[in-house]
Amino acid sequence: MLKVTCAIIFRQNKIFVAQRRASSAHPLKWEFPGGKINKDETAEECIIREIREEIEIEIYIHGKMSAAFHDYGFKQIELIPFLCTIKSGKIKMNEHNDFNWVSLSQLKNIDLAEADKKILDNPKNKMMLEKHLRENMNDT
């Protein structure tokens, strides 16, 4: 099973989503950015590296969420999500087609990759996201 991390990045009560390129394994699907854990790398080190590589920002990790398991047919993944905010940098798309900032309620109307949907379907993750939103309503 492939271990993959993703960042659920908050800013002003919105969540960052990125659209995969047409030539990717999941063409034009939206996702929380991240990537595969390298050998001898922790999940936390992975998400920091992947976000730096994919969108050129530095992040704070506020918490690790419950993993989602999904079988795409051609690969099985364990997707490990982290609740994050931006520490520094300006978003630059190096791996994706597009990006958007959406509310938690708007996420259900987006064509998310299946594993990413499972993160949101987990009741513990949903509670953690809602709690973060309530506690940070006035953040910029």
Image (cartoon, helix red, strand yellow):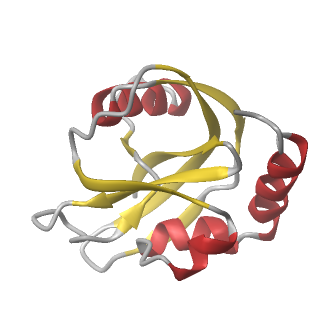
Tell me: 135 left or right of 11. right
Tell me: 34 left or right of 14. left
Tell me: 137 left or right of 42. right
Tell me: 35 left or right of 6. left
Can you say which quadrant of the picture contains the C terminus?
Answer: top right
Q: Nearer the viewer, residue 62 or 106?
A: 106
> Image height check: is 7 above or below 91?
below
* Residue 41 visible in the displayed image: yes
Residue 109, how many percent across, how many down? 53, 81
Report the residue that reaches farthest toward the top.
88
Picture quadrant of residue 44: top right
> Image height check: is 24 above or below 99?
below
Residue at 42 percent of width and 25 percent of height: 57
Residue 64, how many percent across, how many down? 69, 41
Q: Nearer the viewer, residue 101 or 71?
A: 101
Residue 5, how many percent across, how many down? 47, 45
Residue 26, how many percent across, how many down? 25, 70
Picture quadrant of residue 50: top left
Q: Nearer the viewer, residue 131 or 41?
A: 131
Residue at 47 percent of width and 33 percent of height: 47
Residue at 39 percent of width and 26 percent of height: 90
Can you say which quadrant of the picture contains the N terminus?
Answer: bottom left
Residue at 68 percent of width and 65 percent of height: 104
Picture quadrant of residue 119: bottom right
* Residue 38 visible in the displayed image: no
Numbered-mark total: 0
> Image height check: is 53 above or below 103?
above
